[in-house]
Image (spheres, rainbow, N blue to C red):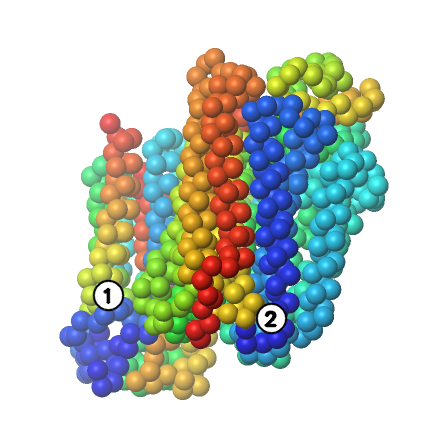
Amino acid sequence: MDTPHKPHFIRPCTRIWLALMILTCTTFAIGETGWSGTAVMLTVLGTAVIKVEMVANYFMGLRRTRWLWRGLVLGWLILVSGLITIAYLMTVK
Amino acid sequence: MSETFTKAMARNIFYGGAVFFFLLFLGLTFDTMQQLPGRDHRENITDSVVRGKHLWETNNCIGCHTLLGEGAYFAPELGNVYARRGGPFIKAWIAAQPTGSPGRRQMPNFNLNDQQLDDLVAFFKWTGEINTAKWPPNIEG
Amino acid sequence: MINNTRTSHEIHATPPGDLAIWFFIYAELLAFGVFFVAYAFARANNVELFNESQQHLNRTSGAINTLVLITSSYFMVRAVAAIKQGLSNSCARWIAAAIGLGFVFLAIKIAEFNATFATGISLSTNTFYMFYLSLTLFHFMHVILGMVILAAIMVKALRGGYSAENHIGVETGASYWHMVDLLWIILFPLVYVIR
Amino acid sequence: MQYQSQAVAKPYFIAAIGLFVGQIIFGLIMGYQYVVGDFLFPEIPFNVARMVHTNLLIVWLLFGFMGATHYLIPEEAETELFSPKLGLITFWVFLVAGALTIVGYLMVPYATLAAMTGNDLLPTMGREFLEQPLITKVGIVIVVLTFLFNISMTVLKGRKTSISLVLLVGLWGLAIFFLFSFYNPSNLVLDKYFWWWTVHLWVEGVWELILGAMLAFVLIKVTGVDREVIEKWLYVIIAMTLITGIIGTGHHYFWIGTPEYWQWFGSVFSALEPIPFFMMTVFAFNMVNRRRREHPNKAATLWALGTGVMAFLGAGVWGFLHTLAPVNFFTHGTQVTAAHGHMAFYGAYVMVNLAMISYAMPMLRGRTANSGAAQTLEMWSFWLMTVSIVFITLFLTAAGILQVWLQRMGDTPMGFMAAQDQIMIFYWLREITGFVFLLGLVMYIWSFFCKKGEAQTAA
């Protein structure tokens, strides 16, 4: 994250930041449409998972640490989003 | 990056975490205090109920019974005894103690006069009306 | 390592910042994770109630808050990058910006809470509002705690307390702040969007 | 024993073990009353025996904590006690107040005791664990405040280590939360709400700080591991304790009239409460494995390791067993609660006190450790007491589950006494195991007087 500061060079973290903003706007847009259903839920939740992974790996710098620390966050994320999905699917049937 | 795990940071997290969660606990307590009047019908606390609670305490009934599930597990739950047995039965039962049947658990006689028994029943009646989120599971308590 | 600055392509044994904060971060992730799952399964039991009550939420303010927190988190990344090059003042300015956005988040959140409480909704109104208020209030307090930490770091940075060689404190504060942002990134879609 | 004033701890430890024996005797009386209902009736009705049993437990644990503090603070602060005399005065006042209270419980009916001791002035009696008369409660406050003054002044004039600071936070917290025992509103729901501020915030809050500090001290002395490492982990563990324990109070606010959101907060946070106990066990074993010296007192090491494991099992696992609201709905107020109570109190607080006594007593008598034979005897007592508590807990858990099945499930639930008759077998088994526990305790005491083998005075 600390490549030397050269002018008119967009840092990686800035690109990540932009991506996060865009993904948030898409989630908001989906929310505004008021659609519901499994497909919509999976997209929204998937977006959240991607965003969390980006924050954890790039912003928090876990990208350059041992797999233990990244695995903990990733494992937690998969468990939580998995259970949320299961809970959601329970209501769809 | 130096692999640091400093005692100073651990100490800060201890103090920060403790204060943080105690404040959250106070916040929840404040909200509970707002909600309680609607759940415990405190307006029904008559002098008789107050005297009844005093009798419950000064005779250490909690030493054998549970009240709303808290106390000793030697004798029945009394949180819903008014609904289970009704006032007259409670008064008669207390006055008739101890049963004296050999080998059975015994309840002492507290020599309560009729007024005191009425107060105790009033306390049980009030306790039974507290909104305890549908606890106990059934009338047996 | 001769100096302990983080060169870009090296795998480190521990994440940036003090390991103790990471114990706290994982504990908080666990606590929030359990709450998120509890929300999901509570929703599974009364879908109509959740969907109906969710309509009354102010999704716009939730979305803006997400953008605010992500940007504030980004500022902290820039603050860490600045201090790595020993630029204490620039680092302090980035932290100040992050705290500024923190206040924006709090302001929006307080406005949202006032609107909700004004309609007489409380923790005991129904299960959805209990979860909505508990999760957002719990997170709200974490934002305040995070800002206190960032303020402490900013003051130290202004006094030149950090350098290219030694800036563990900044990374610790940044990690905690990223966690606060990360939790909101899940909380927003879960509570405001998914129906 | 590096400082003369550490000798003040000796009477506290002796009194602690003495009261411990009393507690177990009344435990056995109650255990027998469960199966033969009219045993010792009306001389000692069940409620009196229970008061003596629970009050002796809490008082002997407090004596143990105060003894441990008087022993470790001078060593931690590297200075003599502020006033050893005050330490002894506090001891005698507390012992006499405690003894009078127990005698009062036994000699007069409770209602008469209440009338005699001015309970009408400020009614605080008749609540579980807080049955002491008003004058005793005021006496306890005075004793604890003088004790805290004495200890705090010692730390102020000496070296301030994390262990002594954590211990002080724990002790001051203990004193502050005891004040809630004076608040007894006529509204039962408010009464219970703040009653838990004394009971829960003691045993799942500040007492765990005291437990952590004592265990850390014993581990430093027994393993010789660097103080910095141990204190670092101590802070992380007690941080987790308060983070989960404070809101964990919610698992007592499910069914007493408080709003229903407590069922979510109480379940979630108390489900996390076993984590600090698990970390304490990993921490204890880790420190012993990385020990840098072979301390001759093997028994103290065993007690320290046992504390971690049994605290995790009793308070952690058995606590989690019935802490989630949907489960607690059925097990609340049954023998499952009693099972958790026994193993949690023994595993967390009895064992850490015995670890401290087992470590400090030889030092107070001028030797580093007892003889090999004495230690073997002590280890036998460790296994006897620990295994018997495990069995008591298993029997009560089985009794509790059967009680729930008979009395609270299905559409033809049994009455309380009918259900009790069906689980009598478990009460018999529990009573027998209780005698095994007493045997273990007697062996523990005997191990301090065992003459065989020469005491080790290795530094």
User: Could you tell me the amino acid type at mark 1?
Assistant: Leu
Q: Position of residue C62 (x, y in %)?
A: 38, 52
Q: Label 2: which residue?
A: D6
User: Could you tell me the amino acid type at mark 2?
Assistant: Gln
Name the residue: 69% across, 16% down.
B99
Q: Is residue B5 visible?
A: no
In the depicted structure, whether residue A85 falls above or below residue D404: below
Q: Position of residue C189 (x, y in %)?
A: 31, 48
Q: Is residue D144 left or right of residue D340?
A: right
In the depicted structure, whether residue D66 falls above or below residue C161: above
- Characterize the local packing of mark 2: few (<14), some (14-19) or many (20 or more) Cα atoms within 10 angstroms: many
Marks counted in the figure total 2
Name the residue: 29% across, 36% down.
A87
Q: Residue furthest front?
A: D452
Q: Label 1: which residue?
A: A62
The C terminus of chain C - image quarter? top left
Name the residue: 25% across, 85% down.
C3
Q: Do badges 2 and 1 share one subunit? A: no
- Characterize the local packing of mark 1: few (<14), some (14-19) or many (20 or more) Cα atoms within 10 angstroms: many
B31, D362: nearer the viewer: D362
Q: Is residue C84 visible?
A: yes
Name the residue: 40% across, 68% down.
D295
The image quadrant of residue D325 is top left
In the depicted structure, whether residue D343 falls above or below residue B60: below
